[in-house]
Structures are given as structure tokens and as C-alpha cells.
Amino acid sequence: MRQRIMEENKTVKLPSGRKGLLYRMFKQYVWLAHSVYYRKIYFLDKENIPENAPAMVVSDHQNSLNDALALVLAINKHGKRKIRAIARADAFDYPVFGTIFRGIGIMPAFRLLYQGIGSLSNNADTFAKANHELLNNGLIIIYPEAGHQDKRWLGRFSYGYVRLALETAEKSNFEKEIFIVPSCNHYSDYFNIREDILIKFGKPVSLKPYYELYKEKHRTAQREANKAVRDRVAEMMLNITDLDNYEAIDFLRNTYGIKYAETNGFDSGKLPEKLLSDKQFVERLNTLKTSGKENEIQHVYDDATFLNSEIKKLKIRDEFFDKKTSCTKIILMALLFAVLFPLYLAAFISNILVIYPPKLVNRKISDEMLHGTITLVLSVLITIPLSNIIIFFSAWAITGSIPVALACLVCLPFLFIFVIWYGKAWNRWKSRIEFRKLFKNGKLKKLIDVRTRIHETLDKLLTTGKEQN
């Protein structure tokens, strides 16, 4: 059977996906850049990915190319398994990106919504290549939502991936057991550098139970398999389905949600536990809305929307309402910033080419969910190599020592991390000063009253806090 399959597919021309020295070096370089871009990276339950069996990894899609990059690194950090990914065809429109994507085995998918009905025939080549990989126990990554979402919710899944998997099974006379592995990605923050990311893999869905149904009713089998996969992805991720109150719920989980996590035994400082807490918190809010508490919870949402808007306008932080800042601490922080400023200035100058070009490009990109991708991709492909070349030869010219120049290169990632930390700490310090000033002038009284009302109402509705103790 295997020999016959190989013969049927021998004309399929696959993307190279080369594993030579340059490829391996580039992959390690990308991994390093990814590790610097994010503060903490969590890859969970990788054992759910079947070995030596055809599989497709299906995930939610909320952060453009950053999702795919993280997923590839999660599965194959050390290059032990060949992976192909299917991405939107418009990502290949730029010649440089298209060449790189095809070189590492990413294949284009043409969508009716984006490229029009006339482009769909171009998918035949991608499907043939994907069939070939699955028949040879390969691994395919695909995002059934087609486009990335702009919120923490799960969109509609197209059936294309299920059709591809079941057609592959049919090509093997249904002797191959095809698996679909549900996956979710989750970020502590979409837009800022040095935040946390989580990639989690769920129990695989075997398509074998759908084979007999597929023989009789193709569409019904696709629909039922798709529902099973989508339900598992939805269960794993933070899926805020109440989109009318999305901003309020998202604000509450990042404010009151900290208190909720700690009260219910979760460590809010660890993203995997915060995700579990947030899922539970949002589910309980949804339950309240459908169990006779709709008016009360809607008042909470309205208050949260107002409080969130005012906090943003005043450029303060919700956490400062609970953590009063002393004048002594503000002064000590000012002294620390003064002492570290020369190091910050040197670090900033060393990384200016890495920091600013992505910001300039992102100003012209209206879709904020693309900003992280622009920052990471532009840095990896252009600004980091250019900055490293300039720093290396400058240090070599000044010192006349290649070891010193190489030492400067080694220090650059750490200096970049320091620059980001300093900037965030500086903004936090300024926010503390503004909060203290507004508090002393009595200008936060209304916000304090609203916030107290939110917490007291949620404590009562969720039976947390003092009542529970």
C-alpha cells in the first residue's frame, strides 16, 4: 500500500523545507529572537501530538503570523519532525516573504473572502502537497478561521481542513487513521513586547469513526467532525462569546479577575493558571446573565465600561486603587532610574534600529492585530541583522578586537530586554505619580465609588471574598 501511495504522489512537487546547516542556524536564530520578544513561553501537552501518524494541528487564530511561528516552535523546536503549514495566500504577495515561506514549507491557501472565487482553483496544488504529506505521516498546521480575530473569541471554522483530511483517508482506501489535534494560543498581551505566550495541545480527534459516514454522506461527516474539533478548541481557549460586552468583560478579567484568581486558588502570575481562572470567571459571568441576574450583571458591565474609559483617559492603572504608593517609594524609584539612566541610554542607542522601524511601519497599519507580526518579522529579517552588523564592525573599529566585538553582540539581547523593562517601569512610575496626585486632590472619588460597587456586586454574585470566607 505504501509503495502504491508513493507512486501516486511522485509527481507532487513539495516546498523544499530544507534541513541544511543554514536552515538550522536560521531556525535557532528565530528561536532566540522569539525568546527575547516574549518574557515567558509556555508549551503545554505536546505529548498529545501523535507520533508516526498523519496529523493536522488546528488552532484558534488571534495574532497573525506570531500564532503560526509559536506553534511551529512549540512542535518542532529541535527539528525532529517535518512540518508543513497552510497560510493565507495574500501573505505570499510580497516576494521576500513568499520566498521564505515556501522555502520553509509553508503553502498558500486561497480563500473566497480574500482572493475571490476565481482563485479557488489554485488550491489544488496545495491540497495535493498536503495529501502527500499526510499519507507519509506528515504534520500539517492550519487555521480554519481563515483570518485572525481581533478579540479573544473563536470564529466560524471553514470545512476545508476536514475535507482535506478525509480525502487523504480516502486516498489510502481508509487504511490510514488521520488525527486532528486541537490547539489554542493565548497571550497575556497582544500588543506589547516582553509579554507571555501559551501554546496548548488538546487530545487528538481521530477521524476514523467518521469514515463510514463519509463514504455515504461527505458533507455530513465533514460537519460532524468539524464540530467535534471546534468544540475542543473552544473548551481550551478563552472564548468570550458575549461580544456586546466584550470590552467590559476583558477589563474585568484583568482587574477584578486578579482577585478572583487568588480567591479561587489560582496563581495569577502564571499564564496557564490565569487562563484557567479567566475561563472559569467568564463562564460564571455568562451563567449569571442567563440565570435571572441579567440586570445586575449588565449594571456591572456598564460600570466597568465607564471605569475602563476613565482610567485610560487619566493614564492610571486599576491596580493602584489597591496598592497605595508612598512618597518614599516614588523617590527611591526616581533615584534608581537616575542611576540606571546611563546604561539605559547606551542600551537604547544600541537597539534603536530594532525598536523604531517597526513602530514607524505599524503607524500605517490600521489592523492592530498585525502590529506584533510586523514588529517580530521586521526585526528578525531586517533590523536585528542590520543592527548587529553595525554594532559588530563599530566595536571592532573602536577596540581593534574581534572578541570584544563578539562580546558586544552577545550583550545586545540583554540590553534590548533592559530597554523594554526600563521603559515599562518608567511609564508605571509616572502613572503612580499621576494617581497619587489625583487621589490627594480628591479627583478619584467617583471612580473609587464605581470600582467599589463593581467589586461588592461581583463578590455577592460570585460568592467570593468575605462572604465565602
Image (cartoon, rainbow, N blue to C red):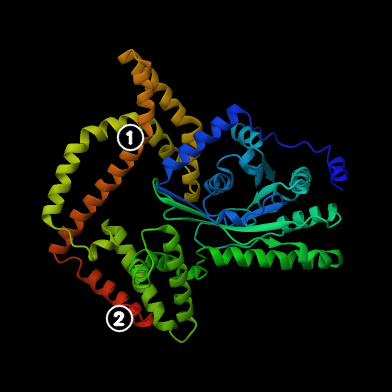
Image quarter (top left, top right, bottom left or bottom right) of the C terminus: bottom left
Front disc: 2 or 1? 2
* Residue 370 in the image: above or below residue 166: above
Decide which of tag 2 and tag 1 comes sooner along the chain.
1
Q: Nearer the viewer, residue 17 or 66?
A: 17
- Label 1: few (<14), some (14–19) or many (≥20) C-alpha neighbours in 10 Å: many
* Residue 440 in the image: above or below residue 135: below
Q: Nearer the viewer, residue 107 or 295?
A: 107
Give the residue displayed 83% in from the left and 66% down from the top. 212
- The image position of residue 465, as x and y in percent, is 31, 77
* Relative to 431, 364 lies left or right: right
- What label sits on residue 415 in the rendered view? 1
Q: Quadrant of residue 156?
A: bottom right
Q: Are marks 2 and 1 in contact (CB under 8 Å)?
A: no
Describe the element under mark 1 as helix, strand or loop: helix
The residue pinned by badge 2 equals 469
Q: Quadrant of residue 419?
A: top left
Kind of residue at badge 1: Leu
- The image position of residue 199, as x and y in percent, is 52, 54
Give the residue displayed 74% in from the left and 56% down from the top. 178
- The image position of residue 274, as x and y in percent, is 41, 63
* Relative to 119, 173 lies left or right: right
* Residue 2 in the image: above or below residue 207: above
Give the residue displayed 50% in from the left and 64% down from the top. 238
Kind of residue at badge 2: Asn
Describe the element under mark 2 as helix, strand or loop: loop
- The image position of residue 350, as x and y in percent, is 33, 29
Real-space CA distance between mark 2 and mark 1, rounded to the nearest whole angstrom: 46 Å
* Relative to 454, 136 lies left or right: right
